[in-house]
Image (cartoon, rainbow, N blue to C red):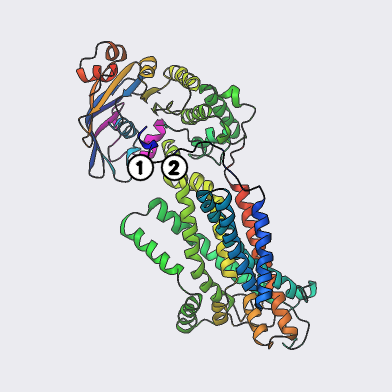
């Protein structure tokens, strides 16, 4: 064989291996070492200890693997450990955020808090709640969803199933541009157009107009990707049965991708639920309960959080309420996500026997 | 029921690329016609022009005439959707609808085309599944997803789906190329039964299969890569395989190609 000369063949298939579970041992060792060095060097910041431990983990893994297993395996282990370290680094802020919100928010988070408004409660007093803000958020987000979902779905269907040539390219381009529009700009646009030019009042509906500007491109994008995943063979199978194109799309293409589409819509909903800027500009906020989204100022959860925090000077009743409302907002978004996953799993094409 | 196909001067394009050129042939009703030829010679493209599926591909364009019992499929007054109901198709890879059960897959063509009464529908589903020799294997699991069947069963499910709408012609684009010999045999037997009721056109790379199932065989070839494919000859299967009139056909069949 001619390439036997260039790539030496190993004499045996057996090589020395690090014992199983050694990664955990090295992780423990590097945490200990990292804390030890941090303590001795007097590093005040625990983040520095962690970074030190992460660095040590990679270095020790490489050294140990290089000594025992050889250089190729060492490089392999380093790549694996770098992936683990970055994963941990990414999860830590998320976990810590959730932990802090639950810890601080749980103080005043109860049935009373969920069931009452801030109607007769001054910002400095304890008591009050987020009932009015929940109603506001539900109505604004609900209206925005009702407006954006049909528009977004139909646009995506046009782009994937019908769009050819210039118009489709232009639509794709503007959807991309819209994805990047900052929420405050969407708010200012609706403010100038809906309120200043057309002369309507501040209302929850004005807010949902701005929210749907933010929502539509997200829905179009995700739905487009999902529709593209539907194999062309299914479309052809349906067309070859003599099914018109529109029924093929409605009965074959969309049902096949409905799980992914729902997930995309839910993620879009989750995204706009936390928007503060357009709500601040267009809905104004209100400490009383206003169930009519088409008339008068309304409250909303992110706006409530912002206002409570702004009036709290970092402690006291308003500060606690801001954290509790954050907890409610996170819980709301999390429930939406769980529902989306449930629907996606339930609707996904089955492969079982 | 089964109709005659008369093709004259048919040329098909993908954009500016000419895929097949000037093809004329007649397909007799209640018979099996096999298309053979090297890859890329336009057999599948030609098959797809017979039920106006070619134009579904972006850039797909057809010139010439396809007469289905004296009706030109490419006349301006013809509705392609109606054509596809009359000329059914089975594809190379089994493609049951993944969101639908076995029952719904077979009923899909009827349901998506209009409303049917429930009892009528189950009757047609049973008849089609029996027609595709699949009924005994799936009658206890009609509500299970079609994607849970084996490859051969899925292909027979697709055949059942195609014959459920009672087409006049059935086009099959290499229906056995993804299947094992036993499933292939099942489908070949099925083709023999189906030709009593339908006009069948089948594309195949398997010469023995063409010899086994078809009454007439058409040989397609192309001069070079990038050139359009052409019909070399069409004749009784027996003659094509024993004593073809064109040398190229004999070379291809006996393996002395090029």
For the residues beneath circles 1 and 2, the answer to whether they share a chain is no
Q: Disc 1: which chain? A: B
Q: Is residue B208 above or below residue B147?
A: above
Residue B78: within the magenta?
A: yes
- Of the 4 image quadrants, the one containing the C terminus of chain B is top left
Mark 1 crowdedness (10 Å alpha carbons): few <14, some 14-19, many ≥20: few
Q: Which mark is residue A235?
A: 2
Above or below, comparing residue B95 to residue A320 in the picture: above
What residue sits 61% from the left and 69% below the top? Answer: A52
Nearer to us in this view, A166 or A64:
A64
Q: Helix, strand, or loop for circle 2?
A: helix
Q: Which residues are magenta?
A: B64-89
- Circle 1 residue: B56
- Disc 1 versus disc 2: distance between alpha carbons? 10 Å
Give the quarter of the image for residue A78. bottom right
At x 65% / y 52%, what residue is drawn?
A: A22
Tags 1 and 2 in contact by the CB under 8 Å rule?
yes
- In this image, A259 relative to A291: left or right? left
- Please report the residue visible at 45 percent of the width from the left and 72 percent of the height from the top: A181
Q: Nearer the viewer, residue A306 or A205?
A: A306
Numbered disc total: 2
Horizontal relation, residue A209 to residue B6: left or right: right
Residue A17 on image: x %, y %? 60, 45
Numbered mark located on residue B224 in the image: none
B132 in magenta: no
In the picture, measured across the screen, residue A190 lies left or right of residue A64, that is left
**In front of the other: A162 or B96:** B96
Image quarter for residue A27? Answer: bottom right
């Amino acid at each position: 064989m001619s390439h036997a000369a260039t790539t030496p063949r190993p004499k045996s298939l057996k090589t020395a291996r690090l014992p199983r579970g050694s990664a955990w041992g090295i992780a423990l060792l590097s945490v200990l070492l990292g804390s030890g060095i941090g303590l001795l060097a007097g590093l005040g910041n625990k983040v520095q200890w962690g970074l030190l431990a992460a660095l040590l983990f990679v270095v020790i893994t490489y050294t140990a693997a290089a000594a025992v297993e050889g250089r190729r395996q060492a490089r392999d282990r380093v790549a694996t450990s770098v992936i683990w370290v970055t994963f941990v680094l990414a999860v830590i802020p998320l976990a810590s955020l959730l932990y802090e919100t639950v810890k601080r928010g749980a103080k005043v988070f109860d049935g009373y808090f969920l069931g009452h408004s801030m109607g007769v409660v001054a910002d400095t007093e304890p008591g009050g709640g987020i009932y009015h803000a929940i109603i506001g958020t539900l109505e604004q987000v609900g209206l925005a969803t009702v407006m954006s979902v049909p528009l977004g779905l139909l646009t995506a269907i046009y782009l994937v199933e019908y769009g050819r040539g210039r118009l489709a390219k232009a639509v794709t381009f503007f959807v991309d541009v819209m994805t990047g529009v900052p929420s405050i700009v969407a708010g200012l646009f609706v403010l100038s157009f809906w309120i200043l030019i057309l002369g309507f009042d501040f209302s929850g509906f004005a807010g949902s107009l701005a929210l749907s500007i933010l929502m539509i491109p997200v829905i179009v994008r995700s739905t487009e990707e999902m529709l593209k995943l539907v194999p062309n063979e299914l479309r052809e199978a349906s067309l070859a049965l003599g099914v018109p194109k529109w029924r093929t799309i409605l009965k074959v293409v969309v049902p096949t991708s409905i799980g992914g589409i729902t997930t995309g819509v839910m993620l879009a909903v989750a995204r706009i639920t936390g928007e503060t800027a357009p709500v601040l500009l267009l809905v104004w906020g209100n400490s009383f309960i206003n169930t009519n989204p088409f008339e008068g100022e309304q409250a909303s959860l992110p706006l409530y959080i912002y206002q409570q925090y702004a009036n709290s000077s970092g402690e006291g009743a308003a500060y606690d309420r801001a954290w509790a409302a954050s907890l409610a907002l996170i819980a709301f978004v999390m429930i939406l996500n769980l529902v989306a996953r449930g629907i996606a799993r339930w609707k996904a094409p089955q492969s079982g026997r | 029921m089964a109709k005659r196909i008369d093709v004259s001067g048919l040329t098909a394009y993908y954009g500016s690329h000419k895929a097949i050129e000037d093809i004329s042939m007649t397909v007799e009703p209640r018979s099996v016609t096999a298309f053979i030829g090297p890859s890329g010679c336009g057999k599948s493209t030609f098959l797809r022009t017979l039920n106006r599926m070619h134009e579904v591909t972006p850039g797909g364009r057809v010139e010439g005439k396809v007469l289905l019992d004296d009706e030109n499929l490419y006349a301006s007054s013809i509705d392609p959707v109606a054509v596809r109901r009359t000329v059914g198709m089975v594809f190379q890879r089994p493609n049951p609808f993944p969101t639908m059960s076995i029952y719904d897959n077979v009923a899909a063509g009827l349901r998506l085309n209009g409303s049917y009464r429930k009892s009528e529908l189950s009757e047609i589903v049973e008849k089609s599944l029996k027609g595709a020799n699949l009924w005994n294997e799936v009658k206890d699991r009609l509500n299970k997803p079609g994607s849970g069947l084996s490859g051969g069963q899925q292909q027979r499910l697709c055949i059942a789906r195609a014959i459920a709408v009672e087409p006049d012609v059935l086009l099959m684009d290499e229906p056995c190329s993804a299947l094992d010999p036993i499933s292939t045999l099942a489908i070949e037997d099925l083709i023999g039964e189906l030709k009593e009721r339908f006009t069948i056109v089948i594309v195949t790379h398997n010469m023995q299969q063409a010899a086994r199932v078809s009454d007439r065989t058409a040989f397609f070839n192309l001069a070079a890569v990038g050139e359009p494919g052409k019909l070399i000859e069409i004749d009784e299967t027996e003659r094509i395989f024993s004593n073809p009139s064109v040398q190229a056909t004999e070379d291809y069949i006996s393996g002395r190609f090029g």
